[in-house]
Image (spheres, helix red, strand yellow):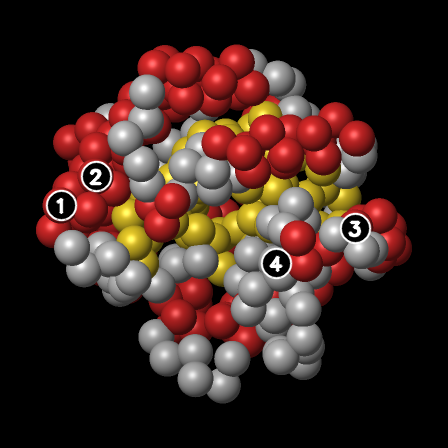
Amino acid sequence: MKENILIDTHAHVNSEKFDQDRGKIITNAIENGVGAIINLGDTIESSKHVLELAEAYDICYAGVGVHPEEAFEMKNDDFDKLSIWAKNKKVVCIGEIGLDYYWEKDPEKRDLQKRIFIQQLDLARQLDLPVCVHNRDAHGDTMEILKKEGKGIVGVMHCYSGSLEIARELVKMGWYIGVDGPLTFKNAAKLPEIVKDIPLERILVETDCPYMAPAPMRGKRNEPAFVKFVAEKLAELKGMDFEAVKRQTTINAKSLYTRLK
C-alpha cells in the first residue's frame, strides 16, 4: 500500500444511510485519494456486515466488536463469532469497544459496559490484535480499565474527547489519538490545542461517517472521501505541508493496524 494516500481509520459505510449508493461512496473515496477504509462493527450483526464489505471491496477493512451503547451479556457463542471473524486477514482490530456514559446513566448498565469492555480487551490480547476504543464521558473508568486490564494491548482512542493530560498519558502508553470532523468545527474547544501538543506520529485521521461531517461539509452526510478535510485541518494546526501529514498519518495507521500491509 502506497503512503501518498489517506486512510479513513474509522468509518461505518455499512450504515443503512449508505444502502442506496454504497458503491458510489467507495468509488468517490478512491477518486479523492483514500487508499483504505476501516469500517468498525458495533454489534454482532454489524461486525459480520463490515467483514462482508471488506471481502467485497479491496479498499475496505474491518474491525469487529460490540459498542458500549449496544452492550449486552455476551455469551461464549458471541465471543466465538468475533474470534473466528477476527482471524480473517482483513480484520485489523477488535472494535468499536469501550464506554459511553453520555447516554447511559444507570449504574448497573454502566457496569455491564465495563464488563464487556474488559472481556473484549481480553479477546484482543488472545488474538494479538490492537483495539479501537470509544470513550464518551467515561475518561476515568476508561483509563483505569486500560491500565489494569489492557496491559500489553495497543490501540486508538477514537474521536478523541479527553483532556491534554490523558492524551499525553495515552501517547506514553504507545497509543494513538483518532481525530475526525470535530477538529474542524469552530467550537472545537480544546481539541486543536491537544493536536498541536501531541506528536503527529501518534495521530490517526478518521471520519466516523455517516456522522459528524467536517467543515466545509458540516450538515451533510459524512463519507470517507471527506477525511481529507480532517487531514488538511491537522496540517494547518501543525503548521505542516499537507502531503507530509498525509504520509505520516498513513504510516501511523499501518503501524497500528499491521494487516493493512
Q: Residue at x 79, y 30 (%)?
A: 56
Q: Mark 4 to mark 1: distance in Å?
A: 30 Å
- Crowd around label 3: few <14 · some 14–19 · many ≥20 (10 Å): some
127, above or below 233, in the image: above
Pick whichever, 76 or 121, lies toward us: 76
Name the residue that disc number 1 marks.
108
Q: Position of residue 18 (x, y in %)?
A: 72, 55
Whether pointer 4 and pointer 1 mark residues with C-beta atoms closer than 8 Å, the reply is no
Residue 230 sits in quarter: bottom right
At label 1, the amino acid type is Glu
Name the residue that disc number 3 marks.
22
Residue 112 is marked as 2
Which type of secondary structure does the marked residue at label 1 adopt? helix
Which type of secondary structure does the marked residue at label 3 adopt? helix
Sequence-first tag of 4 and 1 = 1
Q: Quadrant of the C terminus?
A: top right
Pick whichever, 256 or 214, lies toward us: 214
Pick whichever, 202 or 260, lies toward us: 260
Q: Mark 2 to mark 1: distance in Å?
A: 6 Å
Name the residue that disc number 4 marks.
209
144, above or below 223, in the image: above
At label 2, the amino acid type is Leu
Residue 26 left/right relative to 76: right
Q: Nearer the viewer, mark 4 or mark 2?
A: 2
Residue 144 sits in quarter: top left
Q: Nearer the viewer, mark 4 or mark 1?
A: 1
Sequence-first tag of 2 and 3 = 3
At label 3, the amino acid type is Arg
